[in-house]
Image: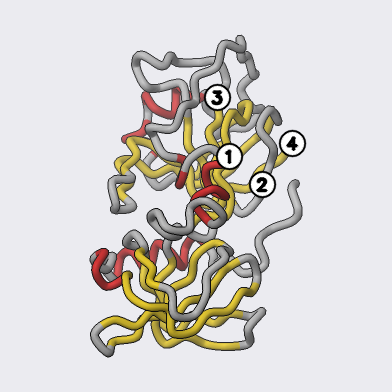
Amino acid sequence: TYAGKPAEAPKADVYMKAKQEVPPPDTSSLSGKIAETMNSGGYTYLCIEKDSKKTWVAIPETKVSVGENISLPPGYEMVNFTSKTLNRTFEKIVFTTGPTSAHSAHGASDKMSAHGGSMGSKSADTSTTENIKVEKAASPNAYTVAEIFGKKSELDKKGVVVSGKVVKVSAGIMGKNWLHIQDGSGNAKDGNNDLVVTTQDIPKVGDTVTANGTLYKDKDFGSGYKYDVIIEEATIKK
């Protein structure tokens, strides 16, 4: 089992509750002048002011300064979120992936790119010339990657186990790590060879792992991130 979990990241179920209860704010509400900022637990907390309205936002740690203008993509609003490292509770705060342009040279955008694209995006390049072959896990609810795609309707919201090689990692985005796993089953043409898994664990690209989590079909996170199949809240064992 992997250690080294992010110190500050809210649990995935908290994010999904926020998604269900509060729609993502529009982009305009996440732009303005930085009135206050602080770094803690791997995040940069910003108080953004626009038209006399102040909005607290959290992004992956990024170099910013008070007085700068900043523009951020839509995110997820959380109510009464407590930062343990700051020992502070925010009445409302929006978690998002980072500045859209101005700070990408030294901030969150580069951090996400280094891990292979934000949120384990379906458009991320996960092609490989390697001949991957990983045996199916020894568990009653174990499936190959291709089987998971083929049985997504009957397995929706059920626990599944899948083994595979990690081909891409996007770490610390929206409070979780996004993995792409392949086991050699399926094919890229049919789109059933690459499985996205979210977890608080953080393996390395090239690791052969077994993921145990809950399958969701047709999962829509907003902002263009929609997945035919995704495994959520998984524990990862090597």
Which residue is nearer to you in this view: 62 or 155? 62
Marks 1 and 3 sit apart, C-alpha to C-alpha, by: 12 Å
| Numbered circle sitting on residue 202 | 2
Can you give x and y, in whole percent of width and height, for residue 5 in the image?
A: 69, 58
| Of the image marks 2 and 4, the number of the one nearer the N terminus | 2
- Could you tell me how far apart the alpha carbons at marks 3 and 4 are, in whole angstroms? 14 Å
Label 4 crowd (10 A; few <14 / some 14-19 / many >=20):
few
Q: Quadrant of residue 186?
A: top left
Q: Quadrant of the C terminus?
A: top right
> Which one is earlier in the sequence, the residue at label 1 or at label 2?
1
Please name the residue that numbered disc 1 is placed on: 169
Q: Residue at x 54, y 82 (%)?
A: 82
Instruction: Give residue 155's quadrant in the image.
Output: top left
Whether residue 204 sits left or right of residue 152 in the image: it is: right
Q: CA distance from mark 1 to mark 2?
A: 8 Å
Q: Are marks 1 and 3 in contact (CB under 8 Å)?
A: no
Residue type indicated by callout 1:
Val
Residue occupying image coordinates x 57% and y 33%? 168
Helix, strand or loop at mark 2: loop
**Residue highlighted by disc 4:** 238
Identify the element where label 3 is drawn: strand
Q: Report the residue that reaches farthest toward the front.
A: 67
Real-space CA distance between mark 1 and mark 4, rounded to the nearest whole angstrom:
15 Å
Q: Which residue is mark 3?
A: 182
Which one is earlier in the sequence, the residue at label 3 or at label 2? Answer: 3
Above or below: residue 213 compared with residue 130: below
The residue mark sitting in front, 1 or 4, is 1
Mark 3 → mark 2, Cα distance in angstroms: 16 Å
Judge left or right: residue 183 versus residue 14: right
Element class at badge 4: loop
